[in-house]
Image: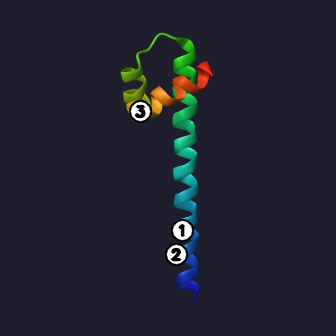
Amino acid sequence: MSRIIDEMWEQSIRKGIEIGDKKRQRITAQRALADGRYSLEEIAHITELSLDEVAQLKAEQKA
């Protein structure tokens, strides 16, 4: 039983880290977009977001 709980705990921790990483990537992309010095391709490369995700963030900033 304890092993199952430990596995669930570890899975929850990994999921939390994944969510935090994605949030940090998006924040970094938003800052780079606001700065205006980087192309969408550069931002996608730096943040490891897809080009579509970066383009979506840019569209959200304009809205």
Secondary element at tag 1:
helix
Q: Position of residue 22 (x, y in %)?
A: 52, 43
Q: Residues within 10 Å of mark 3 (few under 14, many from 20)?
A: few
Q: How far apart are marks 3 and 1 (CA)?
A: 31 Å
Q: Where is residue 17 in the image (x, y as percent from the top left)?
A: 55, 52
The residue depicted at 60 percent of the width and 19 percent of the height is: 62
Q: Name the residue under label 3.
A: 52
Secondary element at tag 3:
helix
Q: Residues within 10 Å of mark 1 (few under 14, many from 20)?
A: few
Using the image as rendered, state which of residue 58 and residue 22 is in the foreground. Answer: 58
Q: Where is residue 19 in the image (x, y as percent from the top left)?
A: 56, 50
Q: Mark 1 points at which residue?
A: 10
- 9 w.r.t. 19: above or below: below
- Give the amino acid type for the residue marked by disc 2 in the picture: Glu
- Give the amino acid type for the residue marked by disc 1 in the picture: Glu
Q: Distance between the residues labelled 3 and 2?
A: 34 Å
Secondary element at tag 2:
helix
Q: In which quarter of the image is the C terminus?
A: top right
Query: In the image as oriented, which residue stretches furthest toward the front?
Result: 63
Checking the image for residue 44, the label placed there is none
* In the displayed structure image, the side of residue 37 where residue 1 appears, left or right: right
Upstream in sequence: badge 3 or badge 2: 2
The residue depicted at 37 percent of the width and 28 percent of the height is: 45
Answer with the quarter of the image where residue 1 lies.
bottom right
Using the image as rendered, state which of residue 62 and residue 37 is in the foreground. Answer: 62
Checking the image for residue 7, the label placed there is 2
Q: Where is residue 39 in the image (x, y as percent from the top left)?
A: 40, 16
Mark in front: 3 vs 2: 3
Upstream in sequence: badge 3 or badge 1: 1
- Give the amino acid type for the residue marked by disc 3 in the picture: Asp
